[in-house]
Structures are given as structure tokens and as C-alpha cells.
Amino acid sequence: MKLYNLKNHNETVNFAKAVKLGLGQQQGLFFPVKLPTITPIQLSEILKLDFITRSTEILSKFICNEISKDKLYKHVKKAFSFKHPLQVPITKNIHCFELFHGPTLAFKDFGARFMAQMIFSLNTKNESVTILTATSGDTGAAVAHAFYKMKNVRVIILYPKGKISELQEKLFCTLGKNIKTISINGSFDDCQKLVKEAFNDKKLKESIGLNSANSINISRLLAQICYYFEAFSLISEQQRNNLVVAVPCGNFGNLTAGLLAKSMGLPIKSFIACTNANDTVPRFLQNGKWYPKKTVSTISNAMDISQPNNWTRIEELFYRNKWNLKELRFGSVSDDITQETLKELFQLGYVSEPHAAIAYRLLQNQLKKDEFGLFLGTAHPAKFKNTVEKILNNNISLPDELKNRINLPLLSYNINPDFNKLKEFLVEN
Ligand SMILES: *Cc1c(COP(=O)(O)O)cnc(C)c1O
């Protein structure tokens, strides 16, 4: 698999290098030179396969010249070794596609665990690797658990202090061993900036074998393509003809993966890019002006991102496929409406959480007659227990993954958003 840097098309790398580097020169994102496709006949065959076999087929379209299909199958099996996504009917023409049944209760388990497998598999010389990543809540846990106790790998996770839920924090800041967590006195965008600065520091990068695990890492995106096919395999022929998928967006990795699935030949009619008040993309799609505002905190904190990294990939994908950005549906939802929507879903017999509720709201508003809608359930409601309980006035029980960690002490360090401080930490710890 060959990829080019979106900021400098002359920089090309193979999959192994793209996974290892995370970002290219000038912090450019990598993008596939060839976009593999499957025919409608191949599609109907592939949809009949089980999740692991099908996912291997999909991923091999991108990377089988670098990792054999047999080997890939073993990695996919290990990465996706948890309860598969579930589809839950909410109304007659709207279902929730729940992606949160992995070990850290968010869809990020798919990408993070596959990436961990790839880094392990591609590290043939047993070099020491430092994974440095920023999280707005759920990536941290997914990455930490995916790499926990993995040989030759040290993981460092930055997160905005006080801006992730207590349970989110407990899930990954209590592990210890090869997992180090640092709370930053700032926003998620500040954390992301620190990570970028570290990657720009060539000397540092080489001396500690720096690797990123954000949704910018191509291996994570590829893994996420797989569950869109799974969603499609679970719906009826009629529903398949008019499928609209609503994606709760933060860094826009999830939506990028969905669009990649469509680009391969999965006939999803339309996507809705859903955001909270951090609405840079909806405003851009409305008026053509890219004008990020200061990030604001919302109850859907994993989406509190005003400069989404993956957006350039989406633009490239539209350009390469000769799609029109006008076809992308979009919307943003305030905290007030999100709360009302959570109550509305509860009335319908479904306990949700703020991120998915935003996607449901926009889907329900925008779905046309004869269309069938899926909204992605990106996290388990228990991860946002306090918020959800307050809004619904109802108790939410904790799944075992959380129950086991809730009383453990936090092991995080704390620093200001100052690159020199981070550098010191990276060298000393
Ligand atoms: C990360 C996350 C999102 C946003 O996903 P992106 O791929 O960054 O757009 C949405 N919901 C939840 C619960 C998340 O953890």
C-alpha cells in the first residue's frame, strides 16, 4: 500500500512507514494513492462472511502486499476479539448501531486495537516504541488498553484536565506499568498541539521512537471501515437501498472511515456529519468559510474539537471520487437540545448518551420519506453516568469494565500546555 502526504504529495510511504510515522512532513496526513474498490457481486459475497473474515478481506484490499492475508486474519481476530456491534431498533426507520461493546466501551476500541496489532506486527526488529497520543476522552482508554503490557512499547497519553468524565479518566489513568498519563491544564486542541510539536522535533522523535495513536494514524481509519460493512450486512434489502448514516463527529476519523467504505463500493446513500456547538465543519459546509472558533466544553466532550484533523482527508476523498461536498449532510446540536433528545430517546425505551443523541437528533430531523437511518452509538451510556443520570433522573448500572476500576487511584501527572515540560517528561520517564 502506497500513501502520500496531503501537504506534500512527493512524500510517499508504504503502510508500515505510515503506521510508524503517524504524520508526514509538515504534519501532513497520509492518504492512499490507490483507493481499492469492490464490485456489487463481490459486495454481496463479502456481506455473507462473518465479521472477522469479512474485515480481513476488506483490510487486505489495502495492505495485503505488506501483510499476508493469513497473518492479517490472525491480527484482525485478536484486535476484534470482543462482542461485535449490535443494531438496536429505535423507531420503525431508525436504528442505533452500537459500537461500544469493546473493553473500553467506545468505538475507539476497533481502531486502537487494530493499530496495536499492526505496530506489534511491523516492529520486526523489536525496537522500543513510544506511543504519544492526545485524547478528548475515549481514545486514551482504547489506546491504553490496546497496548497494555505490550513488549517494547511505552504509551503516553495527554488529556485536558477536568474536561473528561471521571469514569473516562478512571478507565485509563489507573493502569500503570507501560501506560503513563498526563493531564494538561488546557483544552483538547492544546493537547493535540503538544503532540504535533513533539512529532516536529526530529531529534526527540528518533531518540525515543515516537509514534502517534490518534485517529490520524492510517491503521485506525482502515480498521473502522470494517464495521460500516457489518452495519450494512445486518439490514434488509429494502433498508439497504436508501441508507443514511449519522455520525457523531469530533476529529472526523469515524466519518472518514465511513466515506472510505462508501468509496470502496458500499452503497450508503448519504452521511450526516453531526457536531455539538464546536461546529467548524457545519459552518464550513454552510458558507464555505473555514473559521474555527475557540473550543467550547459541552456534555458530548469527546466531540469538543474545533480543528478536526481528519477534515483534509475527507476533502481529498471527495476530490478523488469526484463527489460533491454539497451531498454531505450536516448539522450541529446544542447541549439543551441534546438533553431533550436523551429524554426523548428514553421515552422510546432507549438509554443513550450525549454523543449518539446528537446523531439521532439530526438523523430524525433530516431523514426523508423512504429513507432508512442508522446513527452510530459511539460510547456506552455508563461512561457518562453522571450526566446521563442527571438528565434522565434514572440510575445507570456500571458494566464490569468500569466497576473494576472505579476505586483505583489515579496515576496521572499534570503539566501546563508547554512543550518543554512535555519534552522533559518524555526524556526522563
Ligand atoms: C471519539 C469520539 C467521537 C468522535 O469521533 P471522531 O472519529 O473523532 O470524529 C464521538 N463520540 C465518542 C463517544 C467518541 O469517543
Image: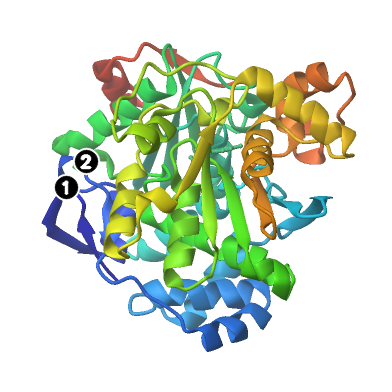
Quarter of the image where the C terminus is located: top left
Q: Nearer the viewer, residue 379 or 328?
A: 328
Q: Position of residue 265 (x, y in %)?
A: 47, 73
Q: Nearer the viewer, residue 264 or 28?
A: 264
Residue 220 in view: no
Secondary element at image label 1: loop
Mark sitting on residue 27: 2
For the point 87% across and 39% down, which residue is it? 348
* C-alpha gap between disc 2 and disc 1: 8 Å
Residue 356 in view: yes
* Neighbour tally class for label 2: few under 14, some 14-19, many 20 plus, Cα within 10 Å: some
Mark sitting on residue 209: none
- The amino acid sitting under disc 2 is Gln
- State whether label 1 is within 8 Å of ligand 1: no
For the point 24% across and 17% down, which residue is it? 420
Secondary element at image label 2: helix
- The amino acid sitting under disc 1 is Lys
* Neighbour tally class for label 1: few under 14, some 14-19, many 20 plus, Cα within 10 Å: some
Q: Is residue 197 left or right of residue 297?
A: left
Mark sitting on residue 7: 1
Q: Position of residue 60 (x, y in %)?
A: 44, 76
Quarter of the image where the N terminus is located: bottom left
Which quarter of the figure has residue 381? top right
Q: Position of residue 67 (x, y in %)?
A: 39, 75
Quick check: 376 above or below 365? below
Q: Nearer the viewer, residue 162 or 203?
A: 162
For the point 76% across and 36% down, which residue is it? 352
Quick check: 113 above or below 131? below
Q: Quadrant of ligand 1?
A: top right
Q: Find out whether the residues at labels 2 and 1 contact each other: C-beta distance under 8 Å.
A: yes
For the point 49% across and 38% down, which residue is it? 178
